[in-house]
Image (spheres, grey):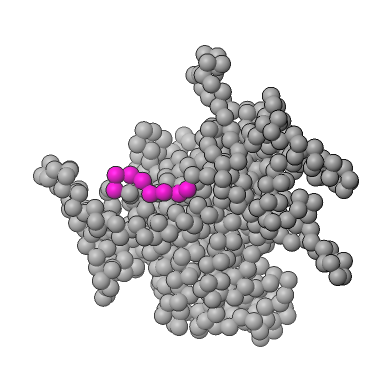
Amino acid sequence: MLVTIPTSYAHGKHSPEETKDRALQQRVRRLHTKLEKGIVNADTLVDIEKEFEDYVPLATKACDFLTKSTDPFLAVKESSDALDAAGFVKLSKREAWGGKLVPGGSYYYTVNHSTLVAFTVGAKYKAGNGFKIIGGHTDSPHLKVKPLSKRAGAGCVQLGVECYGGGLWHTWFDRDLGISGRVLVRKVDLETKKETIEQHIVRIPKPVARVSTLCIHLQTAEERGAFKVNKEEHLSPVIGTQSLLEAAAGKQLNQTVEDGDAWKKGQEPALMRLIASELGIETKQIANFELGLFDCQPAILGGIKSEFLHSARLDNLATVFVALESILDYSKSEDLAEDDMISLIACFDHEEIGSESTQGAGSPVMSEAVSRITAAFSENTHSRDPETYSAAVRQSFILSVDQAHAVHPNYSSKHEKNHGPKMNAGVVIKTNQNQRYATNGVTGFIAREVARKSKVSIPMQEFVVRSDCPCGSTIGPILSANTGIRTVDLGMPQLSMHSIRETMGIADLAHGLNFFKSFFKCFNAVDNSIEG
């Protein structure tokens, strides 16, 4: 494992943990230098294995979060539960916040149950001061159940599914798939006869569905040479056989005809029964759902020294996890007493499909957060003072954090030779002169300065796409254009992005967390040191 070390460090006293971290990284660097010169044998690296285990507790905690967060609804629910446990106050978007927010307080709210905003108010905050924002996204490419799910063929009961986002769909074949998402449940009060619709989040982690590949014996020579996926014809998963499920289907069909509900009539009865059983309700109470499939295999540590984290949805739930940990940590920090800004995380839905939705980064969610929080501390809480709001925007800064592309050892030519991020080697700053990323000279410098001022060593890397290769994008340019807030794009490096199983280094989780902590602590000082 190669861990890169910055050439300069912040001055001052360090805790035992910080000193240990710095000593470890310096030792690793010295050993690798000797290895390159042939001075020591590779076995010498074995003696640092125990030191490397310091990264394992955070990575193990991340595994639990990733395994439970099988879709945006579950990611927001898991995050909300952690915020509740830490004493964050849940806000209602439908109510005014004037008089409800106080300096030193911690709050959160959700949008559509799939986007999360959480923030901590500095003890010295005043309306018009800036916001330190970490932005990420909760969604990942996966198979979504169609509005009318019933489908069958060759004696098999299947589900109609649609591809969400730009997934590597060939990786979804021959995997054990569970189902999760949001279910609308109809409830009737027995006394008043009043009907209400409740929203329930469901996760069924058993392998109820599977997309099977065609055996090699039935493939043509051309098909064997290149695995081509027809997303409509080849990705419908099998959930059972008609002979075993037809009795249940008949019973359910009769029920739907009696109800006169065309939506229910278009659903696979076996799926409706499964959901009802999981929620402890009757199938007739299900009014609607938004469901998706996920890989049942849990997140796990791997590699010779357990230096990797293998999981689904690392893009971008690794960011959500680290952002959550950072805001939870900062809400209890002594630094909050001297802070005069808002520290905020915003995790958006729908990044993988363009962010143009009511809960995506292209929506008013970000600007509304800045506006409403600022107004809640203004003397006149019933109107937005343009001057106060504009002053807050100009003092604010966004870390747009989305996973980065590590160099693949088998395809290293795909990276620009001087900008090839490596796993377990630090946080990656992304730059694109055509503004596919929002980073510029000043925002990139601020990110590096935040890392430099940390008491814990935070290695930083750079990514620029090859000039002969198209460049992806993320929420950074969208947020900066919509809000006018300065933004830098960065992320933690990984392999296999958009596969059903992805890989990243566990040291980078710690680097990311330390960077976020330093951002909340040091940004104001860094920003004030820059002219203009």
Residue reaching furthest to the left: 39
User: Residue at coordinates 71% horizontally, 41% vertically from top-left?
Assistant: 270
Query: Horizontal and vertical percent for residue 52?
Result: 27, 55
User: Residue at coordinates 69% horizontally, 33% vertically from top-left?
Assistant: 244
Query: Would residue 435 appear left or right of 36 to someone viewing this image?
Result: right
Query: Would residue 521 appear left or right of 231 to someone viewing this image?
Result: left
User: Residue at coordinates 87% horizontally, 48% vertically from top-left?
Assistant: 259
- Out of 197 and 251, give the one closest to the viewer: 251
Above or below: residue 344 compared with residue 45: below
Report the number of numbered marks. 0
Query: Would residue 238 appear left or right of 266 to someone viewing this image?
Result: left
| Residue 299 located within the stretch drawn in magenta | yes
| Residue 452 located within the stretch drawn in magenta | no
Q: Can residue 103 be seen from the camera position used here?
A: yes
Residue reaching furthest to the top: 221
Query: Horizontal and vertical percent for residue 191?
Result: 86, 70
Query: Horizontal and vertical percent for residue 516?
Result: 43, 64
Q: Can residue 394 be seen from the camera position used here?
A: no
Query: Would residue 45 appear left or right of 124 to someone viewing this image?
Result: left
Query: Horizontal and vertical percent for residue 84?
Result: 56, 71
- Out of 333 and 420, give the one closest to the viewer: 333
Above or below: residue 328 compared with residue 465: below
User: Residue at coordinates 71% horizontally, 35% vertically from top-left?
Assistant: 245
Residue 146 sits in quarter: top right
- Image: magenta residue range: 298-305
| Secondary structure that dominates the magenta span | loop
